[in-house]
Image (cartoon, coloured by chain):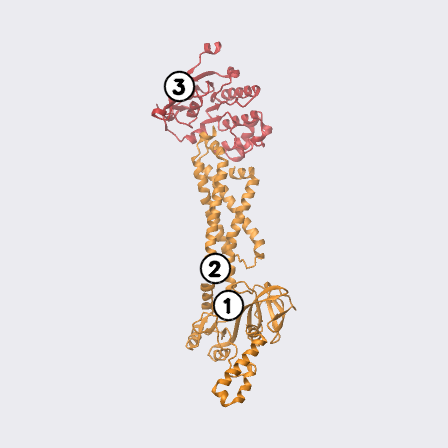
Amino acid sequence: MILSIKDIRHNITHFVITTIGIGMLLMVVLGMGGIYRGIVEDATLLIDSVGADLWIVQKNTRGPFAEISRVPSNLVHRALAVPGVKFAREFVFHTIQREQNGKPLRISIMGLSWPTDKGEWIPLTSGRPLKQSHFEMIADKTLKLSIGERVKLGKETYTVVGITESMINSTGDGIGFFTIADAQSIQFDTPSEAVRLERAAREARGEKSEIGIKQPSLLENAIKPAAELPQIARPQISAVMITMMPGRNADKIAKIISGWDDVSVYTKLGQRELMLKGNVEKVRKQIGLFRVLLTIIAAVIMALIIYTMTLDKIHSIAILKLIGAPNTVILGLILQQSLILGAMGFMIAYAVGQKIFPNFPRRVILKDTDLYQLAMIVLAISICASLMGIWKALKVSPNEALS
Amino acid sequence: MSNDSKTDYAIETTNITKIYGSDNTEVVAMRDACMQVKKGEVVALLGPSGSGKSTFLTAVGLINPPTSGQVIIGGKLALDGPVAKTNLRSFRRKHIGFVFQKSNLIPFLSAVENIQVAMELSGESSREARRRSLELMDYLGVADRADNLPMALSGGQQQRIAVARALANHPSVILADEPTAALDGVSGRQVMELFSKVAHEQDAGVIVVTHDHRALDVFDTIYEMEDGLMHRKSDHELSTN
């Protein structure tokens, strides 16, 4: 006869409510682990999926994800000249916040190196990759845009041609994919008045310069668009991504590029490390601490519940001792209840989590290892929680059955 | 005395004394209590509240060891003063059955399970324990309430289940403390007669602490306690009462 089950059956309502409470608590513990894993996954998603073996960034920066990096766009051609490099692509990445239909719209903008890269590597749930060099975009579904929807960003309007899933940056903002030219156009969008003022300022500076005084006709160029002036550098890009030829050693190519004085180079693994140790590290510690706290709270609550459940049956325990039940029977009764409570709580945590987590604004990723880990934690909590109840039960005198 | 000997006595107590507290707070609850109960004998222990009856019963039941004196059950020395001469809990399980004023059934077990649990604790298989429990319930006239929880039973039925549990492991001793206190006269008498029947049929020594003088005729021997002192009542005393 399993006494623990008989007791649970007798107090089934109380037990079910308690188990649901414990389950919810364990669900939060499980969710915390999943949120951390989601953050890591989101943070490294682009690095993993974009398919670059090496990243060339501004000298002495940890860009482009951990901090701002600016490199000239012609760096692509230099990189292509390095033996062993198959492709070199421009990388532009920045976040903007605009308004769409009266609601704030935060987009992480990523530039695709048109025409080399049309976004064929992006996992689309609907629509298609980019087909033209301008005014098309692929949007992550978290941006809540639909195929064919038009979004005005800066002076231009872009049409959504593809929808992707789970393509978000490390802070959870959905990514919008544009051509590099469009991404830069959005990034460096300047109001017309500012353009006019800059041109006037350029002319004024020219009038005071020696060349302007000697050759006044040159000042006519000052009012032309910046892109038409060779003296003015083209907008810079965030980084250059390199894809190596098969069988080439990334470290050897990185060594060549690291000899250039104006840039730093990182392998894919190095870029991942930078991301995880920079942006994600503090979040990881924060969530980790919360998880530890929640685990302790769950253990304390479970211990109190088990202790209270033990107090509720002190008289029965005394009777059992009176009729000669050995301590192992009493210990088993309490430990089994604690383990049943923990196991049921774990199952509720998992089942409810599976339903609730997909609706969270950030991804909550649960892996088998997380479940095994939580199962071990629950087992440990259940055993620890039962200790106080067992201690109380073992102290009960059979005399108490007579009172 | 040897630790284990053949005897006709189910219970023997030799000068057991129980003292609570010490010095100024010392209270002698029971002094030099001697009792011998033969196998198959039913003994009543009378006395006013606070006279030491329950102290005696818990000492004999190996729950509350005496300060001095010996408790011998079935010829085996169980307590020598406060010193246990055997594993008391295991000894209780095998040799002693208890019935108390309140039925003291485990509330989360059904009537049959309350009996079954005592058998399973002694190593009986679950199936056999259930079969024998139902037999016992039938013997005590409560078989139809097997699956009811204690709270669904009347006081008399609960007490019968308690008696059945006390009999579960064929004890050589049954100790009952005011078993009829919560029962009406008819039920009380039925329970007392049950003890007599069990003692005679199962060759167990039975001690019943009671205030109830209406059913004294079912007992073979009567003891009385007053201010911690125990004496056996003579037939003359009984007839004059």
Chain letter for mark 1 = A
Relative depth, front residue between A351 and B200: A351
Tell me the crowding category of disc 3: few under 14, some 14 to 19, or many 20 or more residues within 10 angstroms, Cα based. some
Asked if badges 2 and 3 are on one and the same chain, I answer no
Q: Which mark is residue A47?
A: 1
Q: From the top left corner, tell me how far across and down residue A354 is, in percent.
A: 57, 54
Residue beneath disc 2:
A283
In the picture shown, does residue A80 fall above or below A162? Answer: below
Q: From the top left corner, tell me how far across and down residue A160 is, in percent.
A: 63, 69
Question: Which residue appears at 50% of the width and 36% of the height?
Answer: A312
Q: Colour of chain A?
A: orange
Where disc 3 sits, the SS reads strand
In terms of image quadrants, where is residue B229?
top left
Q: Amino acid at mark 3?
A: Cys
Asked if badges 1 and 3 are on one and the same chain, I answer no
- Are the residues at dot 1 and dot 3 in contact (C-beta closer than 8 Å)? no
Tag in front: 1 or 3: 1
Distance from Cα at disc 1 to Cα at disc 3: 90 Å
Chain shown red: that is B
Residue beneath disc 3:
B34
In terms of image quadrants, where is residue A130?
bottom right
Q: From the top left corner, tell me how far across and down residue A382 is, in percent.
A: 47, 45
Q: Which mark is residue B67?
A: none
